[in-house]
Image: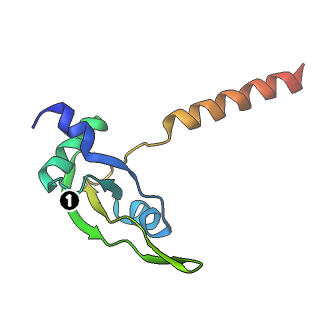
Amino acid sequence: MNNARLYQVLRGPVFSEKSQMLGDSLGVQVFKIDSNATKLEVKKAVELMFEGVEVTKVNTLNVKGKTKRFGKSIGRRNDYKKAYVTLKAGQDVQMADAGEEVANATDSTSETANNE
């Protein structure tokens, strides 16, 4: 496995109520992944993308797209593959660091403006 392949494995995080509860209580992160990805590829991709994180277990599942109606026509959502990645105890994946830094920077500049 080369690094180019590992960078294509993770499609993005899954933000749902269930995934947030799993992350808070059990240290499990949920990702949408490539449909051809294996568990070993997912493990190596997470450890490559998020430095200092150790993966203990990976569970994958295929999610079937729902059939939806749009008036008289019937459409179908895409199928995708999802991975539940269990991290070593006490570790966490920081996905929104850049957004938090920007928010903190704007807060500190507005406080100094109010004080002057």
> Residue lying farthest left?
1
Is 43 above or below relative to 67?
Answer: above
Can you give x and y, in whole percent of width and height, for residue 41 in the image? 15, 47
Question: Crowdedness of circle 1 by 10 Å Cα count: few (<14), some, many (20+)?
Answer: some
Pick the front one: 72 or 65: 72
Can you give x and y, in whole percent of width and height, for residue 108 in the image? 72, 27
Is 44 above or below relative to 2?
Answer: below
In the image: residue 63, left or right of residue 41: right
Colouring chosen for the image of the structure: rainbow
Q: Residue at x 27, y 60 (%)?
A: 83
In the image: residue 111, left or right of residue 94: right
Give the position of the C terminus as an image quadrant: top right
Pick the front one: 39 or 56: 39
Is 111 above or below relative to 34?
Answer: above
Q: Quadrant of residue 79?
A: bottom left
Q: Amino acid at mark 1?
A: Val
Q: Quadrant of residue 67?
A: bottom left
Pick the front one: 70 or 98: 70
Can you give x and y, in whole percent of width and height, for residue 34 in the image? 25, 52
In the image: residue 112, left or right of residue 76: right
Q: Residue at x 28, y 62 (%)?
A: 81
> Residue lying farthest top?
116
Is 85 above or below relative to 8?
Answer: below
Give SS at disc 1: strand
Pick the front one: 21 or 91: 21
Residue carrying label 1: 58
Q: Residue at x 24, y 46 (%)?
A: 9
